[in-house]
Image (cartoon, grey):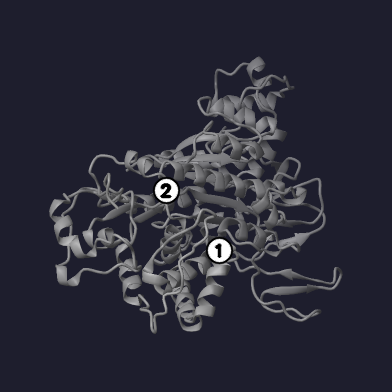
């Protein structure tokens, strides 16, 4: 299997790398601007570039200055942003980082498409509060990833002043506040998106850390829902029996020890009010917002929770954030003795140059739980590996001629009538590449396990990709076009809307099929302005290709559709690929 590489933004101290490198994944680059986490990255991964400001990465990706990775991972702040800004490049300060994250994901996919690589997998993490933010930031983010033009909403809004399962009425602001479910998935025109709240305590660490994880991708062979959702049975670890923690205004919580020889430990942070105290041997959520935490032991003694113990609660190796720095600090005899437990030869001067506890606590609290990230990484690599299984050359399964599937479209130069002759010359191989796919009769019947299919006609490729992504919606909508517009006036109305670019991808795909099946002689022709200009065909009952679309869905499982230069598609061929070329015909000299 090909090694997966990933790009990390808002990298922090790189939970993703600690989790994913043992799985065979490789970091392509990091993007972190804070000084201490950047120092940790430079110390632990000196061979990986830290690109700094993530808002500048999209342009670098498109320019080919940095790698376009297989996976993009990060945890940007989630604030509402203008979907119009995403479409038209407008700035919205409230959601700049969220907007830039989506723009970066789009840039990576666009750049990968130039080399006919599969789209990236997007992984994003945030706090559960994002599901109920008053500005519907999560709906904006989902829409941006999915490729929609307006923000998603969790459900129908009730009347003003009322609440329902999807919206809560906020009397103070006089507005509805969204209540997104803890898990879900959306199939948009650009990507499939899934989200789920995962709690670190079920993954082998004694910390109650609930976080929202989003996985998205435009890949046709990888469904984010299969990464985040478990269909195979009971989940991994069972949390021990625990009661609810008591709350007090005297202490703040959010940090606890993972294990200790003493019993009945209670963990808390101090310096703020509104904390919870836990007596169930679990830790509340580690955050970056508290002073040094303390631990109350069973016999009443108190001590600080060490940075190493906080690292363990997140699943990091001991001392991950204990790095040399340029700033000297005072070291007490107790601290020196503690450090020498792991480094017996450490002298006082060396200890004085090690990182202070404060930045370590903050960086650890800002990070992600390693076991959760490892689980997600395992699911991604498993899904990618599953799609690469069977890449060895296997015998093609070609149907008898009587069972050949016809093309969805009426297409000039279609090869349905000569498939038997063509198949005599097509060898065995891993993948079929068609630089001029046209009506698709060859790939639908050739029996190859994978197909790379290109055509210069963007409307044709949009139809195929939309049928892959939204088959039921497209078939239903196209059938309605056939029923409602089979008159000359209806045909011209659809053609006019098609040429004025008023349709979204789904409606444009349905309109393209309608025009192809209703226009004169099934021609596909555009004028110099790029307008479809074939006239009405006056057919009484044009054929609706339902059976052909169903056959396509059975044949397209590992098909990648692209719209570009035929030469670049041919150059993408590798060992074991089979290329079938059926280019447009040039008239012979001195002939009509």
- What residue appears at the point 66 percent right and 49 percent down from the top-left corner? 99
Query: Depth check: 11 or 253 in front?
Result: 11
Query: Depth check: 23 or 47 in front?
Result: 47
Query: Depth check: 526 or 131 in front?
Result: 526
**Side of 209 relative to 580 (left or right):** right
57 versus 395 height, above or below:
above
Does residue 257 appear in the picture of this structure?
A: no
- The numbered dot on residue 499 is 1
- Please provide percent x and percent y for residue 294: 71, 44
Which sits earlier in the primary sequence, circle 2 or circle 1? 2
Q: Residues within 10 Å of mark 2 (few under 14, many from 20)?
A: some
- The numbered dot on residue 186 is none
- Please provide percent x and percent y for residue 332: 72, 24
Does residue 539 appear in the picture of this structure?
A: yes
Q: Residues within 10 Å of mark 1 (few under 14, many from 20)?
A: some
- What residue appears at the point 34 percent right and 40 percent down from the top-left corner? 572
* Label 1 residue SS: helix
- Please provide percent x and percent y for residue 289: 74, 45
- The numbered dot on residue 118 is 2
């Amino acid at each position: 299997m090909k090694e997966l590489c990933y790009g990390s933004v808002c990298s922090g101290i790189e939970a993703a790398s600690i989790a994913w490198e043992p799985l065979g994944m490789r970091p392509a680059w990091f993007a972190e601007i804070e000084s201490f986490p950047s120092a940790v990255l430079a110390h632990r991964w000196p061979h990986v570039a830290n690109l700094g400001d993530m808002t500048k990465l999209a342009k670098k990706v498109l320019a080919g200055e940095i790698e376009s990775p297989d996976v993009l991972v990060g945890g940007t702040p989630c604030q509402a942003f203008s979907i119009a800004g995403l479409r038209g490049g407008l700035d919205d300060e409230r959601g700049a980082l969220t907007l830039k994250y989506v723009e970066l994901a789009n840039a990576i996919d666009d750049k990968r498409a130039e080399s006919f690589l599969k789209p990236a997998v997007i992984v994003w993490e945030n706090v559960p509060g994002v599901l109920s933010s008053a500005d519907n930031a999560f709906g904006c983010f989902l829409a941006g990833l999915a490729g929609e033009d307006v923000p998603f909403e969790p459900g129908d809004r009730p009347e003003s002043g009322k609440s329902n399962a999807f919206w809560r009425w906020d009397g103070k602001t006089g507005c509805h506040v969204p209540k997104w479910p803890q898990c879900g998935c959306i199939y948009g025109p650009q990507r499939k998106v899934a989200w789920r709240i995962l709690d670190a305590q079920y993954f082998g660490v004694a910390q109650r850390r609930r976080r929202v994880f989003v996985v998205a991708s435009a890949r046709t062979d990888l469904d984010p829902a299969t990464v985040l959702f478990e269909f195979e049975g009971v989940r991994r670890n069972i949390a021990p029996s625990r009661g609810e923690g008591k709350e007090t205004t005297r202490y703040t919580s959010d940090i606890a020890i993972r294990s200790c020889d003493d019993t009945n430990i209670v963990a808390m942070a101090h310096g703020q009010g509104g904390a919870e105290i836990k007596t169930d041997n679990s830790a509340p959520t580690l955050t970056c917002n508290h002073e040094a935490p303390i631990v109350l032991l069973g016999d009443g003694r108190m001590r600080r929770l060490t940075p190493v113990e906080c690292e363990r609660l997140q699943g990091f190796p001991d001392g991950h954030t204990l790095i040399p720095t340029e700033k000297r600090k005072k070291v007490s005899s107790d601290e020196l003795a503690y450090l020498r437990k792991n480094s017996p030869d450490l002298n006082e001067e060396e200890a004085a140059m090690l990182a202070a506890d404060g930045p370590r606590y903050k960086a650890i609290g800002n990070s992600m739980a390693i076991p959760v990230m490892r689980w997600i990484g395992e699911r991604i690599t498993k899904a990618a590996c599953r799609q690469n299984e069977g890449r060895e050359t296997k015998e093609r399964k070609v149907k008898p001629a009587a069972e050949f599937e016809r093309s969805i479209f009426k297409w000039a130069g279609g090869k349905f009538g000569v498939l038997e002759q063509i198949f005599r010359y097509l060898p065995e191989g891993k993948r079929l590449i068609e630089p001029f796919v046209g009506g698709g009769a060859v790939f639908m019947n050739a029996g190859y396990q994978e197909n790379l299919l290109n055509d210069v006609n963007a409307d044709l490729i949009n139809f195929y990709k939309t049928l892959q992504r939204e088959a039921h919606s497209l078939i239903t909508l196209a059938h309605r076009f056939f029923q409602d517009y089979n008159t000359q006036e209806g045909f011209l109305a659809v053609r006019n809307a098609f040429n004025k670019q008023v349709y979204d991808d789904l409606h444009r795909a349905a309109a393209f099929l309608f025009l192809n099946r209703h226009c004169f002689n099934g021609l596909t022709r555009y004028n110099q302005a790029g307008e479809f200009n074939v006239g009405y065909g006056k057919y009484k009952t044009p054929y609706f290709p339902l059976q052909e679309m169903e056959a396509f869905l059975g044949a397209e499982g590992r098909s990648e559709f692209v719209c570009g230069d035929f030469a670049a598609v041919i150059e993408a061929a590798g060992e074991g690929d089979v290329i079938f070329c059926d280019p447009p015909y040039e008239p012979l000299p001195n002939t009509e």
